[in-house]
Image (spheres, rainbow, N blue to C red):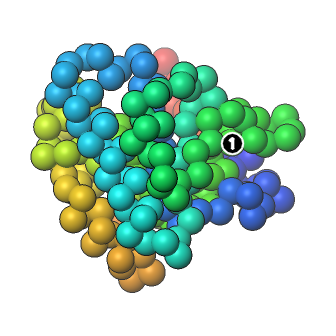
Amino acid sequence: MEHLLLTNNKLINDEHYKSDVLIVGINVHRWIHTSNLIKKNYYNFIEWMGLASKKFPNLKFVYKHHSNNKKDMREEKILNGSRINIISEKKVSSSFDHYGSYYYLKNSKIVFSFASTMILEARCLNKEAYFVDPKFQNSGYFGQLEYLKNIRIDSFESIEKIISRKNNFNEIVNNTFCISSKDTTEKIFNFLQKF
């Protein structure tokens, strides 16, 4: 995968994938019923993203769901009237279909998610990316993971501040989360050969 992301500039630079604010989905129907608190906070997150899209009308908001996402009537109702372009089907017309989310990620400026690990991958690409964790109550995903605290945000006001400064953020130091993706497969292979 790193080979495709690092070398395929034709798809990476496609206008179709560009966004100012990318919202990365999770497999909602697998996790949302874990607790009532997770369900409540997930829909708070969705509401905040809809509000942000209205507050910043000059920015392009894209919500990239997994291609296996199931219709969620509550989510649709919350986002009705928002300015978010919701994408859940595979949009890439090539053998790279299963990398579609990564093309959106590479072409975004700011990334938010309720709990997708793509936030960490976005950080590795030097993107401003955050887990949206209302009131820091999402212990089902973040319990015991204190090192993620500085990339979790807990309020709509924090989202507004981040989007307002979209062109004025400092370069992110990613050593906490990742190493360069160049030659990742080779590094893993060499590590496993030791055993």
Tell me where residue 138 appears, x and y as whole percent.
19, 35
**Residue position for label 1:** 100
Say which of 51 and 134 sits in front. 51
Residue 106, image quadrant = bottom right
* Residue depicted at 49% across the width and 18% down the height: 195
User: In this view of the protein, can residue 147 be seen by the observer?
Assistant: no
Farthest-out residue, bottom: 168
Q: Is residue 168 above or below residue 174?
A: below
Label tally: 1
Q: Dividing the image into 4 quarters, which one contains the N terminus?
A: top right
Please state which amino acid type lies under the numbered disc 1.
Gly
* Residue depicted at 48% across the width and 46% down the height: 80
User: In this view of the protein, can residue 68 be seen by the observer?
Assistant: yes
* Residue depicted at 19% across the width and 22% down the height: 36
Tell me where residue 115 appears, x and y as whole percent.
35, 37
Is the residue marked by circle 1 packed among few (<14), some (14-19), or many (20+) residues within 10 Å? many
Residue 44, image quadrant = top left
Say which of 111 and 9 sits in front. 111
Instruction: Answer with left or right where residue 116 lies relative to residue 145.
Output: right
